[in-house]
Image (cartoon, helix red, strand yellow):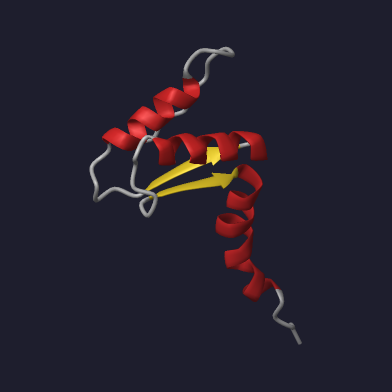
């Protein structure tokens, strides 16, 4: 399930993400992206408090996601010397 949640302040965005993480089957891996470090900390804290399994849920920042999954895989090939 891929979802984007957009809502006004106080619209229960974080709680709906926590509830979805907790209700997913145990065999699913979940990536939760937060833009700010404050939102990442809040999400991680609330997911742990809800008792969701931390091994299958990863909270990551947007820029860390871009670096890890889009830039880093191509770094070795970009450093090759062309004769």
Identify whether 78 is placed above or below 16. Answer: below
Q: Residue furthest bottom?
A: 83
Can the viewer see residue 56 in this picture?
Answer: yes
Question: Which residue occupies 58% across, 40% down?
Answer: 41
Q: Is residue 23 left or right of residue 55?
A: left
Out of 80 and 68, give the one closest to the viewer.
68
Q: Give x and y (percent) for residue 24.
A: 27, 38
Question: Which residue occupies 48% across, 21% down?
Answer: 13
Q: How many marks?
A: 0
Question: Which residue occupies 66% across, 47% down?
Answer: 63
Can the viewer see residue 5 in this picture?
Answer: no
Q: Is residue 36 left or right of residue 45?
A: right
Quadrant in which the N terminus appears: top left
Quadrant in which the C terminus appears: bottom right
Identify whether 6 is placed above or below 52. Answer: above
Q: Is residue 36 left or right of residue 19?
A: right
Question: Which residue occupies 57% across, 12% down?
Answer: 8
Out of 2 and 11, give the one closest to the viewer.
11
User: Image quarter for residue 69?
Assistant: bottom right
Q: Give x and y (percent) for residue 71.
A: 63, 59
Q: Give x and y (percent) for residue 35.
A: 63, 36
User: Image quarter for residue 19?
Assistant: top left
Q: Give x and y (percent) for residue 16.
A: 40, 24
Out of 68 and 18, give the one closest to the viewer.
18
């Amino acid at each position: 399930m891929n979802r984007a949640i957009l809502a006004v302040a106080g619209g229960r965005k974080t709680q709906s993400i926590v509830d979805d993480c907790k209700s997913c089957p145990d065999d699913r891996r979940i990536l939760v992206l937060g833009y700010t470090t404050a939102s990442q900390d809040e999400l991680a804290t609330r997911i742990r408090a809800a008792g969701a399994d931390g091994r299958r849920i990863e909270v990551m920042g947007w820029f860390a996601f871009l670096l890890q999954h889009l830039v880093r895989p191509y770094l070795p090939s970009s450093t090759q010397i062309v004769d």
